[in-house]
Amino acid sequence: MGRLNTLGLEPVALAERLGNARLLVVGDVMLDRYWFGDVSRISPEAPVPVARIGKMEERAGGAANVARNIASLGGQATLLSVVGDDEAAAALTRLLQADGIRTFFKRDASICTTIKLRVLARQQQLIRLDFEDAPSHEVLAATLSKYEELVEHHDVVILSDYGKGGLTHVARMIEVARAHGKPVLIDPKGDDYARYAGATLLTPNRSEFREVAGRWQDEDELIAKAQALRSQLELDGLLVTRSEEGMTLFSAAGAQHEPTLAREVFDVSGAGDTVIGTLGLMLAAGLSMPEAMSLANAAAGIVVGKLGTAVCRQDELFAV
């Protein structure tokens, strides 16, 4: 409880506030499949290792992992997304319901649900296979209609963009949320950030921010570029996650930095989901952006020590 004490937060009271926080997560969901095996020989057919699979696991990824982190930290998560009408969608639904996440999936029979299949041996990833399609215009329109219905019943909106097409109407989603007075947090993708104008907060990682703003030589130039982008897009805040350098929040109050808390980095996949999920939940519970960033940084430090798409539990975060 060191981190909570530093922030002047009482665990029992915070847990109650988190339990009352309602978040709407919208974006690209995917099913993460892990095949674990042993490698003891090279294939006679080609110079590649032969993996003998002994165990398989399934986890909800992408925007679904954002919702999982919210639920794991004690918040109320609602998830809205487009999936295929297939076995992978059924598996995702089953996994999310088990985590207590309220799920609204718009099914598009013309596409397959996004799947990322990872084959691992000796704790090393051998290959990743991706299966994905872009959703149709009709299903996206139906998703937007459902979104407009759901927004007013939630405290914070999180838009998780993995570039799979589920957030085609992101500008309209921002507009609707702001009209209802709801903060909008976005995990962005690509180099066209103009589509995110008017959001409350963006959370690009270091390489994503560099793709948009260009390279910087020192901290002063980074601050100047970040504040210029924040002003241009009319954002309340811009949070740049910086891997081993921690994360920095840029706002009208200036730049506030949190050094990394990771004790051991085992797997960074899904860490961005944990950051934005924790941020959104803490803001919904009434914490300030700097307080929310501090706890999001601590949560990220926990999940990078776990294998694959993982979540941070409330008891783990409170113990930091």
Image: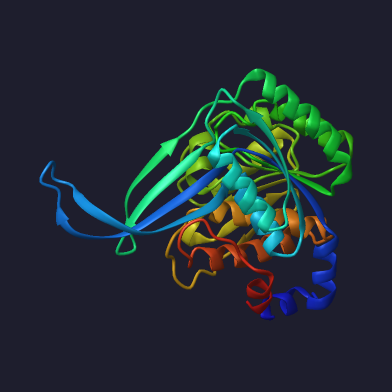
Coordinates of residue 144 in the picture (x, y in percent): 76, 28
Coordinates of residue 269 in the picture (x, y in percent): 48, 53
Q: Quadrant of the C terminus?
A: bottom right
Q: Residue at x 80, y 45 (%)?
A: 183
Tell me how many marks there are: 0
Coordinates of residue 36 in the picture (x, y in percent): 36, 59
Q: Quadrant of the N terminus?
A: bottom right
Coordinates of residue 41 in the picture (x, y in percent): 15, 57
Q: State left or right for residue 15 relative to residue 211.
A: right
Front residue of 54/142: it is 54
Q: Is residue 276 visible?
A: no
Residue 157, by quadrant, is top right
Work out which residue is located at the far top of the displayed protein and give it: 137
Front residue of 170/132: it is 132
Q: Is residue 104 visible?
A: yes
Above/below status of 172 relative to 312: above
Visual colour scheme: rainbow
Q: State left or right for residue 18 relative to residue 217.
A: right
Q: State left or right for residue 20 relative to residue 103.
A: right
Above/below status of 182 relative to 269: above
Above/below status of 251 relative to 162: below
Front residue of 59/262: it is 59
Work out which residue is located at the far left of the displayed protein and give it: 44
Q: Residue at x 67, y 80 (%)?
A: 2
Q: Residue at x 73, y 29 (%)?
A: 143
